[in-house]
């Protein structure tokens, strides 16, 4: 009788592996401001086909996903120099891969409680823009920071 | 009875794990990047000087001549700069004017007109793509056309060059 009990446990735990693979996320393209001039803010729109950041995620059709960004408030530069970066309420755009999917603006900032219904889409792209504001005495050089996107199936 | 209890517990655990898997979560990173350019400066280094001119005789100063005008630019390395000019149509001496035109230009990463890249100065931007160096010298020449009855005197005009990153 004890043997049969163990077999039953194994069968119930089996589905956990496939279900965990239902969502995947990949970073496709960096949010690249390129050259910016001291004292002059520079904005990249999410619609910018070259400079906007891009992620792609997959999730089952019909599911609802939660989208969370971990956004930097500054980019890190030479000799610990910092370059402020901000994200506006429409600086993210999401569009599913189903025919006729309409791009939708999102607020990438924390606590925006972003949800997206996959509908008939099985994947979606998220495009990210932002604004950097170099100070009048900003140190020249290359600046970088990481932007994290987390997708959770609800 | 004991077996039934264990099986129930196993079922509960299985359902609980299954519900957790439905909230599968995953993350990915991209970078946000920017390159802050060094400040762009422009300095008028040398006037465009025609010296003495003779009424009725055109006089040209080429960019390689000693009288050529020169602007110096400092900029970020590996960056392009767009040049544009505001050019006078005449030099002035009081109410008298001396026509000036046929502008010529050249830019170089060394402080010499030899080997400069030629261009025609105008209000339209001229892009200079310089992948090395942080300094550019820009040379300007032109031609003045004094009339046969040109009034004697010292004539001057202002040549303005603007530079922006592109």
Image (cartoon, rainbow, N blue to C red):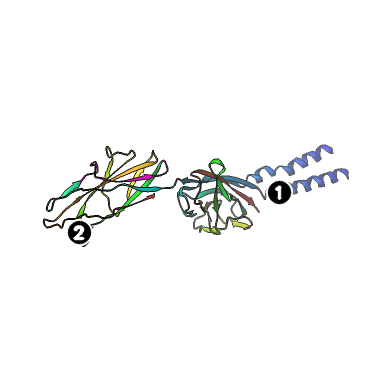
Pick the front one: A55 or B2: A55
Is A120 part of what is drawn in magenta?
no
Regarding mark 2 in the picture, which secondary structure is present there? strand
Pick the front one: B2 or B94: B94
Q: Is residue A139 visible?
A: yes
Left or right side of B120 for A17: right
Q: Which mark is residue A5?
A: none
Give how far across and how far down residue B140 sits, in percent: 26, 47
Give how far across and how far down residue B63 sits, in percent: 24, 43
Disc 2 target residue = B97
Is B63 part of what is drawn in magenta?
yes
Q: Residues within 10 Å of mark 1 (few under 14, many from 20)?
A: some
Q: Which mark is residue B20?
A: 1
Pick the front one: A98 or B153: B153
Residue range corresponding to the magenta coloring: B61-77
Q: Quadrant of the C terminus of chain A?
A: bottom right
Give how far across and how far down residue B112 sits, in percent: 29, 38
Regarding mark 1 in the picture, which secondary structure is present there? helix
Give how far across and how far down residue A81 sits, in percent: 55, 45
Give the residue furthest to the front.
B153
């Amino acid at each position: 009788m004890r043997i049969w009990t163990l077999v039953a446990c194994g069968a119930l735990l089996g589905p956990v592996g496939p279900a965990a693979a239902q969502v995947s996320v990949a970073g496709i393209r960096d949010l690249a401001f390129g050259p910016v001039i001291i004292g002059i803010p520079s904005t990249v729109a999410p619609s910018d086909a070259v400079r906007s950041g891009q992620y792609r995620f997959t999730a089952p059709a019909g599911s609802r996903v939660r989208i969370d960004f971990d956004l930097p408030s500054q980019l890190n530069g030479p000799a610990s120099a910092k370059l402020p970066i901000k994200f506006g309420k429409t600086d993210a755009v999401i569009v599913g891969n189903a025919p006729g999917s309409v791009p939708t603006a999102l607020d990438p900032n924390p606590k925006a409680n972003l949800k997206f219904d996959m509908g008939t889409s099985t994947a979606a792209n998220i495009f990210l823009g932002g604004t950097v504001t170099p100070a009048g005495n900003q140190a020249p050089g290359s600046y970088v920071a990481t932007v994290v996107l987390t997708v959770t199936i609800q | 009875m004991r077996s039934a209890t264990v099986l129930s517990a196993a079922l509960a655990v299985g359902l609980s794990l299954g519900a957790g898997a439905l909230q599968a979560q995953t993350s990915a990173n991209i970078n946000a990047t920017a390159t802050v350019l060094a400040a762009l400066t422009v300095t008028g280094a040398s006037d465009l000087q025609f010296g003495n001119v003779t009424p009725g005789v055109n006089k040209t100063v080429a960019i390689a001549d000693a009288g050529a005008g020169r602007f110096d630019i400092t900029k970020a390395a590996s960056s392009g700069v767009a040049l544009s000019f505001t050019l006078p149509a005449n030099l002035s001496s009081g109410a008298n004017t001396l026509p000036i035109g046929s502008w010529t230009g050249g830019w170089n990463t060394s402080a010499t007109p030899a080997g400069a890249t030629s261009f025609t100065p105008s209000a339209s931007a001229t892009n200079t793509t310089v992948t090395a160096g942080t300094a550019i010298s820009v040379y300007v020449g032109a031609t003045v056309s004094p009339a046969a009855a040109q009034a004697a005197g010292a004539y001057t005009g202002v040549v303005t060059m603007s530079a922006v990153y592109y």
